Image (tube, rainbow, N blue to C red):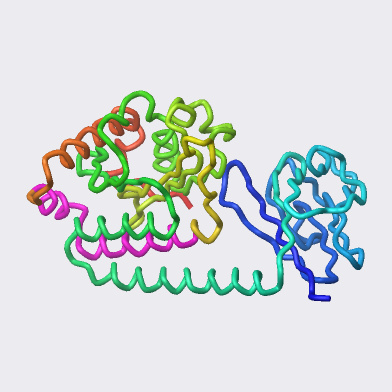
Amino acid sequence: TLPMAAKLTLYPARGASRHYILHDGETRQAGRDPASNDFVFDDPRVSGSHARLEWTGRGWTLRDLGSKNGTFITGSPAAGTPLTDEDWVSFGGLLARFELVSEEEIAALESDRARRLQTSVEIQQELAEERDPRVLLQRLLRSVLSVTGADRGFVLLVGLDGELEAEVASGFSTGSLGERFEGSFGAIEHVLQTGRSVVATDAANDAFLARRPSVLELGIATLACVPLSAEGRRIGLIYVDGRRSDEGKTAGAFTDLDLEILEALAANVSVVLSTLRLDREIREILGGSANAPEERKFLDVLGRRVSEIARSTTAGLSRGSPTSS
């Protein structure tokens, strides 16, 4: 008999998805307490010691350990219940998917992770050599969209007057910048206020983003927003999102690896921007660069729309407010 393995993929509403591997013969405990669990779930709905995935010799069962919010398999309480391929599990409301996989598939997952990390390093090296600010930002956005598989995105920079300006964008149209687009601006506002990345795997059910009209009306399913910081202050951000298809299919969730790569690219480009002294010089260079009329029109509209919403947030950024840790 071939060795059996399983993959448990967590899908937090706010945050990147993450997978855990179970190898043949392994029993693992899951919960919030790092000291007593093999799989640590950092979610307030999860109890300190929440549930146990037990090897039976032929597969795994799931048993709740007296958690506050319960453990369920496709809606039924887990009390030593056998797990089957593609079961949905709720750890107190934190959703996860259980899948049976082969050891070869696990090896392929690890190989893909290593390949993507290497690709990220190569992209960072290429970006570090770029000396044209606009080309740098265009290449950054293309790389981020390619690596994450997102549908659309843009890069914003904070001007000397504290206003946000859209420098490059992909996948948007001018018509998408009305009131319906506020969902993404909620994420932008949060990043500028806190200096921390925002990732939503299920934006429609995210307590912070679900109230934004664009999340439902524009079908935003997943999004990531990452700050650009230089010399101790925020100078802009990268925003990307994925949408639901016409058939209702949800875009692929951003993984912890996606976020790791995105933040690494953002940090790399921030260093390059700082090295080029773009705090002031970028405005002169970009101001004189040639853009297609429609592209420039879109970027201007996007910049104005963002500034209307985030004006109070960004007012102090150009004065050098420190980046949140």
User: How far across and how far down the image is residue 12, in percent?
Assistant: 63, 45
The majority secondary structure of the magenta stretch comes to: helix
Q: Is residue 9 left or right of residue 15?
A: right
Please report the residue visible at 49 percent of the width from the left and 45 percent of the height from the top.
Answer: 198
Q: Is residue 120 left or right of residue 302?
A: right
Quadrant, the N terminus: bottom right
Please report the residue visible at 51 percent of the width from the left and 26 percent of the height from the top.
Answer: 211
Q: Is residue 216 left or right of residue 43?
A: left
Q: Is residue 193 magenta?
A: no
Q: Is residue 285 magenta?
A: yes
In this view, the residue in front, 85 or 317, is 85
Q: Which residues are magenta?
A: 260-287
User: How far across and how far down the image is residue 306, in percent?
Assistant: 30, 33
Disc count in the image? 0
In this view, the residue in front, 235 or 207, is 207
Using the image, determine if residue 1 lies above or below residue 140.
below
Please report the residue visible at 32 percent of the width from the left and 73 percent of the height from the top.
Answer: 125
Using the image, determine if residue 96 lies above or below residue 122.
above
Q: Quadrant of residue 174?
A: top left
Q: Quadrant of residue 202?
A: top right
User: How far across and how far down the image is residue 238, in percent?
Assistant: 36, 49
Using the image, determine if residue 173 lies above or below residue 142.
above
Using the image, determine if residue 252 lies above or below residue 313.
below
Please report the residue visible at 92 percent of the width from the left and 47 percent of the height from the top.
Answer: 79
In this view, the residue in front, 29 or 196, is 29
User: How far across and how far down the image is residue 26, in percent?
Assistant: 83, 69
